[in-house]
Amino acid sequence: MLNNSVIDIAGVPLDLGAGRRGVDMGPSAFRIANIGYRIAALGYTVNDQGDIPVPIPEVIGVQNQRARYAREIGKVCETLYLKVRDSLISGHLAVSLGGDHSLAAGSIAGTASAMSQLNRPFGVLWIDAHADMNTPESTLSGNVHGMPLACVLGRGPSELVEIGGFSPKVDAKRCAVIGLRNLDDRERDIVLQSGVHAFTMKDIDRRGMAAVMEEALAVICDGDAALHVSFDMDGVDPAVSPGVGTPVRGGLSYREAHLVMEMVADSQQLVALDVVEVNPILDHQNSTAILGCELVLSALGKKIL
C-alpha cells in the first residue's frame, strides 16, 4: 500500500474531446471490471464519487472548429479540478477514470492547486502514444483530446488553460512523456521546444523500460515532489489494449505497462492517477478496461511476491 489509505474515484464520461464516440462508457467499463472492489482488496478505503455530468455532443453546437467543444470540456474539467483538489487536500489519492484524455486538464489542475496549498512540488508522468501537445493553431483535427498536455503547460484553448484561475499548472522540466510513437509534424516541433522529457518507443526499445522510468522518475520526483500519472490506454500496444479510439501499433507490451506502474508504486510519491481513453465499443470482452484496472492496482502497490 501507498501512504494514502483512502482512494477517491471519479468517473469522467467525457467524449467531447475525441473524434469518435464511445469513450464516455469508459468509467462504466472500469466498474464492470470491479475496480473499486479490487482496490479495496489491497487494503484501501475506496470512495467512489460516481460520474461527473457531461453533456452529449448531439445537443451542443460546435462554436470553434479549431478546438471543438472546448467550452463544455472546460466546465467538466472545472468540476474535476475541484474534486481532485479536495481529495488531495484531505490526504486521499485521486483516481480519475475516463473518458477522453482532455479530462487531464482538470485533474492536473486539481493536483497543482492542492500541492501549492501543501507547499509541495509535483510532476507529471504522461504515458501515451501521442504527445497531446497540439494547440488550436497547430491541430489538424480540432479534437481537444490532442491538447491537454499543452494546456497544463500553459498553451491552448483558454477554457482549459485557465482552469482554476492559474497557468501553467506544471513546469515542463517536471514533466515526462513515455511511449511516444505518433506525432503530427507541427506537434513534433512543439514537443522539441517545450522542455518536457520525451521518451519515444525507440528510447524504450534501445534502453529498456526500467532505465527510461528511472530517469523519468528521478526528474519528476526530485526533492520529494509528488507524482501525478496520466495513463492513456493507447500507450499500450493495441494487440493488448484494443479498446481505444486512436490505436497505434508498436506500443508498450503488457509487462512494460505493468513495470511503469510498479515503479510508480515503488516511488511512494503517487498522489493522483488518470486512466483514460477506454472505448468499450471497440473493445473485446472488456479486456482494455480489465487491463486498465490491473494497471491501477500495480500503481497502488499490488505485487507479484
Image (cartoon, rainbow, N blue to C red):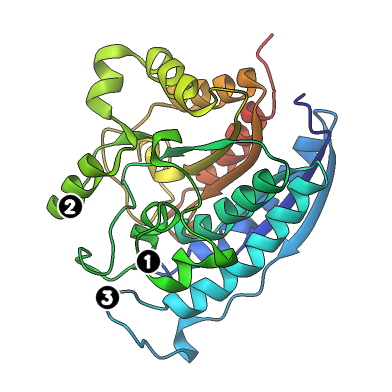
Mark 1 or mark 2, earlier in chain: 1
49 left or right of 231 in image = right
- Cβ atoms under marks 2 and 3 closer than 8 Å: no
Q: CA distance from mark 1 to mark 2?
A: 14 Å
Q: Which residue is mark 3?
A: 66
Q: Amino acid at mark 1?
A: Val
Q: Which residue is mark 2?
A: 184
Please give the name of the residue rendered at 40% of the width and 34% of the height, measured from the top-left corner: 173
**Number of residues whose C-alpha sits closer than 10 Å to that of mark 1, classed few (under 14), some (14–19) or many (20 or more):** many
Q: Amino acid at mark 3?
A: Arg
Residue 17 in view (yes/no)? yes
291 vs 185, nearest the viewer? 185
Q: Amino acid at mark 2?
A: Asp
Please give the name of the residue rendered at 21% of the width and 40% of the height, measured from the top-left corner: 192
Where, by quadrant of the figure, is residue 40 drawn? top right
Q: CA distance from mark 2 to mark 3?
A: 15 Å
Mark 2 or mark 3, earlier in chain: 3
Q: Vertical placement of 80 versus 120: above or below?
A: below
Q: Secondary structure at mark 2?
A: loop
- Cβ atoms under marks 1 and 2 closer than 8 Å: no
Mark 1 or mark 3, earlier in chain: 3
Residue lying at the far front of the rendered structure: 119
Q: Secondary structure at mark 1?
A: helix
Image x and y of residue 111, in percent: 63, 48
Image x and y of residue 64, in percent: 32, 83
Image x and y of residue 103, in percent: 52, 60
Residue 144 marker = 1
**Number of residues whose C-alpha sits closer than 10 Å to that of mark 2, classed few (under 14), some (14–19) or many (20 or more):** some
